């Protein structure tokens, strides 16, 4: 007998892939269940059902079901949807937010419930990036760095030993970050990117765009 479970899960869409003629497979990071995959039936055929479709960065409460005969959850509905409108309108914001999504994706494992602890930090980073003034490139870099340090530490790695990070504990101090020197901020990020690739054994797809954001920030800073 087929048994169906149904539950509500606050989650963020990490990535999506086309499936069959009209479906999508999305990867979610949930607040309660951690990382999981779900199918959205007919998502590519009609966008009315989910108010414009489902895309990366989408955040809300997902109604999920799963039968005992299926390996995938099915998304039935999304409520309390949070939209981050400025991400699609500004390349630098999109770069920073995309790098944050990739961090969360590379450090989480399907079915590992402990991954749920990353949800709140990821949501906060994307929220802050979305509301940041587009000229404030420093803030965009800071939000990425804060999330990177949190996820690395959460995963049990200590970058302060291998990378000789000075003042790494201060990165959680708001006043310290707001006044961090340009050179120090850039140095932290440039050191941490290859470290992330090493421990995850994955190349960061957003790395080149992130380095472009850094170069742009350096160029603007020199002009002033």
Image (spheres, rainbow, N blue to C red):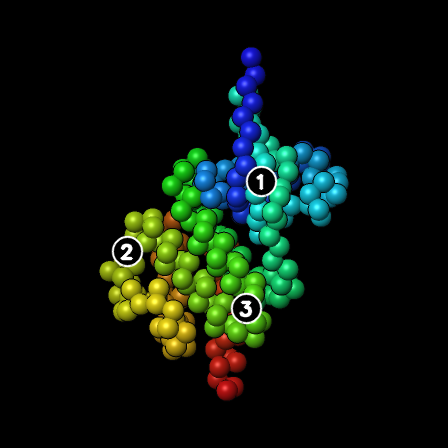
Residue 90, visible in the rendered structure: yes
Disc 2 crowd rating (10 Å Cα; few below 14, some 14-19, many 20+) is few
- Residue 62's label in the rendered image is 1
Q: Whole-percent x and y of residue 221? A: 48, 81
Query: Which residue is at a point 64% across and 38% down the rendered structure image?
Result: 77
Name the N-terminal-most of marks 1 and 2.
1
Pointers 3 and 1 in contact (C-beta within 8 Å): no
Residue 153 appears left or right of 100: left
- Front-lying residue, 43 or 59: 59
Which mark is first along the chain, 3 or 2? 3
Answer left or right for 137 relative to 79: left
Q: Which label is found at residue 158? A: 2
Q: Is residue 208 visible?
A: no
167 versus 18 height, above or below: below
Q: Looking at the image, which residue is at 56% across and 23% down?
A: 4
Along the horizontal axis of the image, is 73 left or right of 109?
Answer: right
Q: Secondary structure at mark 1?
A: strand
Identity of the residue drawn at 60% across and 32% down = 74
- The residue that disc 3 covers is 132
Measuring from the top left, give residue 67's x and y in whole percent. 56, 23
Residue 29: image location, x then y, percent: 49, 44
**Residue 66 figure quarter:** top right
The span from disc 2 to disc 3 (Cα, nearest Å) is 29 Å
Of labels 1 and 2, the one closer to you: 1
Label 2 or label 3, whichever lies nearer to me, is: 3
202 or 43, nearer to the observer: 43
Badge 1 crowding class, 10 Å Cα cut-off, few under 14, some 14 to 19, many 20 or more, is: many
Judging depth in this view, the residue of 3 and 143 nearest the camera is 3
Q: Position of residue 208 (x, y in %)?
A: 51, 63
Spatial distance from mark 1 to mark 2, Cα to Cα?
A: 34 Å
Indicate which disc residue 37 carries: none
> Of all residues shown, which one is farthest toward the front?
80
């Amino acid at each position: 007998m087929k048994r169906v479970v149904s539950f509500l899960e606050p989650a963020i869409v990490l990535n999506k892939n086309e499936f069959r003629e009209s479906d999508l497979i999305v990867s979610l990071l949930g607040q309660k269940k951690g990382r999981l995959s779900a199918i959205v039936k007919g998502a590519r055929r009609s966008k009315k059902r989910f108010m414009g479709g489902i895309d990366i960065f989408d955040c809300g409460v997902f109604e999920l079901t799963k039968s005992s005969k299926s390996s995938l959850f099915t998304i039935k509905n999304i409520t309390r949807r949070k939209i981050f409108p400025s991400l699609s309108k500004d390349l630098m914001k999109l770069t920073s937010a995309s790098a944050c999504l990739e961090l969360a994706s590379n450090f989480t494992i399907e079915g590992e419930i402990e991954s749920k602890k990353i949800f709140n930090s990821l949501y906060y980073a994307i929220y802050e990036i979305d509301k940041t003034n587009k000229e404030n490139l420093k803030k965009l870099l800071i939000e990425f760095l804060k999330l990177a340090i949190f996820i690395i530490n959460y995963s049990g790695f200590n970058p302060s030993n291998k990378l000789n990070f000075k003042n790494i504990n201060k990165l959680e101090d708001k006043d310290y970050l707001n006044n961090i020197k340009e050179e120090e901020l850039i140095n932290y990020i440039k050191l941490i990117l290859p470290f992330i690739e090493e421990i995850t054994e994955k190349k960061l797809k957003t790395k080149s765009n992130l380095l472009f954001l850094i170069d742009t920030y350096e160029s603007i800073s020199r002009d002033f």
